[in-house]
Image: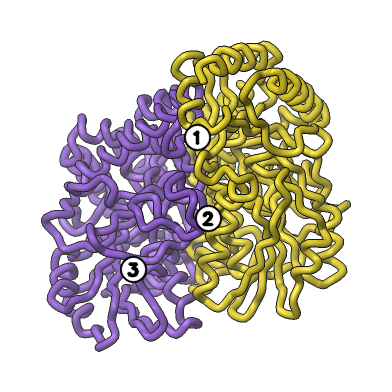
Chain colours: A yellow, B purple
Amino acid sequence: MIYLDNAATTFPKPSTVYDKINEAMLNYGANPGRSGHDLALKASRGIYDTRELLAAFFNVDNPFNMIFTFNATESLNIAIKGVLKPGDHVITTSMEHNSVLRPIKHLERYGIENTIVWADNKGRIRAEQIEKAIKSNTKLIVTTHVSNLTGTILPIKEIAKVAENNGILYLLDAAQSAGVFSIDLKGINIDMMAFPGHKGLLGPQGTGGLYIREGLIIEELIQGGTGSASGSLIQPELMPDKFESGTPNAPGIIGLGEGIKYINTVGIDNIRIHEENLMDKLMEEISKINNIIMYGPLNTSEQGGVLSINFKDVDSSTTAYLLNEEFGICVRPGLHCAPLAHETLGTLNQGAVRLSVGPFNTEEDIDQVILALHKISKEF
Amino acid sequence: MIYLDNAATTFPKPSTVYDKINEAMLNYGANPGRSGHDLALKASRGIYDTRELLAAFFNVDNPFNMIFTFNATESLNIAIKGVLKPGDHVITTSMEHNSVLRPIKHLERYGIENTIVWADNKGRIRAEQIEKAIKSNTKLIVTTHVSNLTGTILPIKEIAKVAENNGILYLLDAAQSAGVFSIDLKGINIDMMAFPGHKGLLGPQGTGGLYIREGLIIEELIQGGTGSASGSLIQPELMPDKFESGTPNAPGIIGLGEGIKYINTVGIDNIRIHEENLMDKLMEEISKINNIIMYGPLNTSEQGGVLSINFKDVDSSTTAYLLNEEFGICVRPGLHCAPLAHETLGTLNQGAVRLSVGPFNTEEDIDQVILALHKISKEF
């Protein structure tokens, strides 16, 4: 089985991640709460350790600016709905995932306007396009860092500059970049950043996070028990408690810490280089195959570890089915929850076959995929 | 180490739960999505199996009426905010957890009224009290099934009848009962039921659920990718997708299935009887100790597996500290995120020491606790 669906979730994880989750579940599987007995304290410290690792990883001084969520979708919903109020305007792009587009479209019914900036046919957005969309009531800009369809890298520094210059908040969706691209939150004017724990950061499913800039006050989406200020019926403003109601996924978060440690040990730049090498090879070899269309920039200087392809007009599900059934290769067809990105490419009906690499893919995996695609190309 | 903090999270879990989570993470740790390659399909099927187990467990015909969430707090927030709109009125009780009280208090700022019905000093609520609180704009009644402070069992059948007779929705918080008390959703008029996966149901942290009655349409709290109707920017109405945006905690949900299977094998009534026996012994023996106050009904016919106590006016944290440090006994002091329940008991300043049993506690555990409490009683 060759796994090339790392943009959906990385698989496998480093063995230390599995080991740590097990250790946490078996030895201190208590509810961390905020105080208490030895087992609760140990779980609580484990969560704090991951919070500290995350803060250091993204160069954030205060670990309490990193909050834990269920997944990046929840993080995005918290950020978008926490900021926008009736009468506000938000700018986003056609390259976004439904986890950005659907909350924003949902808010229309509450009198929150939006502008969607369209990418070119390689998924590229220019910061000037964002700037042109600004209106007097623009409160928030939301963009992805790396497209989950074409892998296109967006010019986030330039967009951040536009936001800063215009006094607008910038929310970055780092779903496809966190853990692969080095992100220095001191070097770039990002107000909020949503990320999954289970993709590039190599943690387990059921983990996600949201960075909220020091001093930025947004409304929480969920109220509940926080183990702090428990005498009050009002959600505490205290970070991170304000956004972390109810029992967290303690073993999952503790496992996520091991994912980050793994990246730190290998070096995030080495992971990126590894993925670039795989992508270079993948794109070069696929360009030699008849009947295949490749989408996106097709250049690793502009592209993350994602490549979408199609055989002429063959439905993407058919190709993915053959890759899976005949060659044991796991890829993802369809729309990848990014309908406007597909509209941008002109693949809304056909979908596309997405191949996405991870740190544990090898050159041999790519060889196998190329071999399989050559064989399939003869069927069409 | 003796663990008596099962009301926070059950520990340990059945070994099959740990084994299954591992198997899922190691062998098919893919993103379930809604279709795709072998690994994704296997994860997806695993989630469906748990959904089916849950539906059967609570006697629900359609497994798609069971939705998976991060925890019971999220479930409660979805249910409360999904139903209530400006101008509506909601009735709840003083025995609720902050996961009910805080969302309801939060909604006051959006013009949603509430009435809190106060329990007697043993945490008891009568259905007539609820009925008296009904106003012309009452839309929802929310109550817990079993208090997380006193263990008091609320008369949910009678409350459900009141709701039904008055055309009001009834949301049950089964945080302390699901997996221990048999709940037949066909035999009782419950419209929505929130429950954690990691307490009585013996699954891992990072899992929760919400039952929504067939045909009841409520607004979702979070929009995002659902893997369904991906071409649309509008959240699909399809159940359970409407409420399950983003990557789920697949290994966690699959592990939860093993928790339910364990309960089915042992028999839920046997688990309840086991906990009743432990509670009977605990209460009988504690009644012989000097200086201890016990709260609640003190009668297992009216009480779940939770007992709160204090030594006279000693701060609950001091007692819990001694139990942990000197005897290795894990209990939870403080307010248990239930401030009005503590106000009901008159323990808002002192807090209380909560002992909560689970299926893996033994009579010997109780013996050890009694011995420890006897020794501590001499210090005060």
Q: Is residue A358 visible?
A: yes
The answer to whether A194 appears left or right of B18 in the picture is right
Q: Is residue B118 visible?
A: no
Q: Earlier in the sequence, mark 3 or mark 1?
A: 1
Q: Is residue B131 above or below residue A191?
A: below
Alpha carbons under labels 3 and 1: distance apart: 39 Å
Residue positioned 69% across, 16% down in the render: A362
Amino acid marked by disc 2:
Thr
Quadrant assignment, res A366: top right
Alpha carbons under labels 3 and 2: distance apart: 24 Å
| Residue located beneath label 3 in the image | B95
| Residue B366 disc label | none
| Residue located beneath label 2 in the image | B318
| Residue B31 disc label | 1
Q: Choose mark 1 or mark 2, whichever is in front.
A: 1
**Dots 3, 1 in contact, CB < 8 A:** no
Residue positioned 23% across, 61% down in the render: B215
* Chain letter belonging to callout 1: B
Q: Are marks 3 and 1 on the same chain?
A: yes
* Chain letter belonging to callout 3: B
Residue positioned 75% across, 48% down in the render: A124
Q: Residues within 10 Å of mark 2 (few under 14, many from 20)?
A: few
Q: Position of residue B11 (x, y in %)?
A: 41, 37
Q: Earlier in the sequence, mark 1 or mark 2?
A: 1
The answer to whether A70 appears left or right of B203 in the picture is right
Q: Secondary structure at mark 3?
A: loop
Alpha carbons under labels 1 and 2: distance apart: 46 Å
